[in-house]
Image (tube, coloured by chain):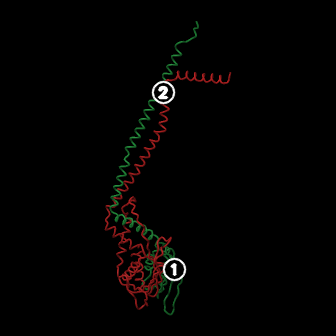
Amino acid sequence: MDLSKDLKDIRFNADLSTFLTVYKQYKNFFLPFAVIAASLILFFIILIPQVQGVISAKATESEEIRKLESLKNSNSNLSLMNEEELTKDLTALNKVLPGTKDFAGIINSISSNAAKSGVSVGNFEFTVGDLNEKEQGVTFPTIQITLSVSGTDKTTVDFVKNLYKSAPIAQINTLKLGSGNTNMKILFYYKALPQVSLDNSLPVVSFSQKDKDLITKSNMWSEAVFEGVPISIDLENFSTDSARINPFQ
Amino acid sequence: MNSSINLVSTRSDALEREQRLLLILRVIAVVLLVAIAFFSIAAFIITTQIPISKIKSEQAQTLSQISASPKKLSSYFLIKDRLNNINSLLASRMDYTASIDSVFSKIPENVTVDSMSIESRLIQIEMSSASLRSIDEVIHSLVSLGSDGKVIKSVKLESLTLNAQAGRYSVSFSAEVL
C-alpha cells in the first residue's frame, strides 16, 4: 500500500471539503466581489484609455481650431491686400535690394544721384568677381565699384547722402576727397530671392507699421533713381576710358 | 441541561453583520459597474462629438481659398523676405552721412576742406584757413563734437601747421565714427 499517495488524497479531500464549506458559507459574497473586480479591470483597461483619448482629442481639437483660425486670418489678411500694390511694393523692394547683380540699377543710381547733386562722374570700375560663382557663406553679397567724381565739397557730400537714400542699397567703403576730385569705393548690396514654396499653411499677417514705413522708404528710394539719366562726365578733369553715357538707357 | 449554551443571540448578530456587509458589497459593486458604464459611454459620446473632421474640412476649404491667389501669396512672402533682409542690412550698414554732416556743419565759411578720407570708421580731415581764430573755432567745435559722443566716438587733433609763404594755417583731425 502506498502510504504517501493516501496521505495526499486525504489532504486533497480535506482542502476540497474546506473550500466547499467556505464556498457554501460565503457564496453570496462571490458575485459582488466578482463584479467589483471586473469593474476595476474595466476601469483600468477601458475607462482610463478612453479618458486619455478624450483629453487627447480635445487637445487635437484645440490645435486644429488654432490652425483654422490662423488660416482664416491669413485668408482675411490676404484678401485685404491689393495685388497691384503688392507687385509695386515688391518691385520697389527688389530695386532697393536686388536679387541679382543689378549693374543697370547701379549705373542708374550713380548717374541719377550725380545729376541731382551736381557732381561729374569720372572713371569707374566694377569689381564683381566670377559672374557664375554663387557667394558661399556671405549674408549679403556686394558689388564694389571704384568711382571718381568731381565737384565741390558740398556737392560731393550731397552725392554721398543721396546715394545712401536711393536704390540699390549702397555703402561707402572708402572715400578720399581732395582738390575737387573724390575717389570712392562703394559697395552695392544684393541678395538672391528665396525659393518660394507657396506653403499655404504659413501665416499671412498684415504688415506692421515698421514694415509699412520701410516699404514707403523703399518706394521713395527707388523713385529717387531715374532710369536713363546720362552720366555727367567732367572731360576737363578726367581722361575717361570707361566712363561714358549710361549704356543701359 | 447545560445553561451556558446560547442558541439565539450570537448567531443572529453574525448573520446580521454578514447580511449588512453583503448589502454594502452589492451596493458598491452596482455603483461601480454603473459608474464605469456611464463614464465609458460618456467618454465615447464626447469623443464622437469632437468635430475634428469638420474642422479639417473647413481648413481644407480655407486653404483652397488661399491657394486661389498664388500671385498675391508669392508676392507677400517675397516682400516679407526683402523686408527682413533690408531691415537687417540697414541696421548693420556703416552710415557716414551723419558724421560728415556733423563735421561739415562745424566748419566756418572761411575754412577750406583740403582733403578728407573715410576708411574703416575713421574720418581724416585736413582744413586750412588764413584766420587763426577760425581754426581755433574749428578745433573747439570738433573737440566738443567728440566729447558729445553722439555721432563721433572720439576726435584727435593730428597736426596744426603754418604755411608762412601762403599765410595759411592748416589743421588735420582724425575722428572715429560711432
Examine the rendered structure and indicate whether residue A83 appears above or below residue B121: above
- Foreground: disc 1 or disc 2: 2
Note whether residue B137 is visible: no
- Label 1: chain? B
Is the residue marked by circle 1 packed among few (<14), some (14-19), or many (20+) residues within 10 Å? some
Quadrant for the C terminus of chain A in the image: bottom left
Q: Position of residue A134 (x, y in %)?
A: 47, 73
The answer to which of B34 and B127 lies nearer the viewer is B34
**Residue A248 location, quadrant:** bottom left
Circle 2 packing at 10 Å, graded few (<14), some (14-19), many (20+), is some
Task: Write down the residue under mark 1.
Answer: B174
- Vertical order, B60 against B25 (above or below): below
Kind of residue sitting beneath label 2: Leu
Among the chains, which one is green? B
* Position of residue B80 measured from the top left corner of the image (x, y, whole percent): 40, 65
Q: Which mark is residue A31?
A: 2
Give the CA separation, mark 1 to mark 2. Answer: 101 Å
SS at circle 2:
helix
Q: Give the position of the N terminus of chain A as an image quadrant.
A: top right
The residue that appears at 44% across and 46% down in the rendered structure is: A56
Q: Nearer the viewer, residue A196 or A140?
A: A196
**Three-letter code for the amino acid on which mark 1 is drawn:** Ser
Chain A's shade in the image?
red
Picture layout, residue B73 above or below residue A59: below
In the image, what residue occupies the spot 52% across and 23% down? Answer: A26
Q: Position of residue B49 (x, y in %)?
A: 37, 44
For this orientation, the residue located farthest to the front is A1
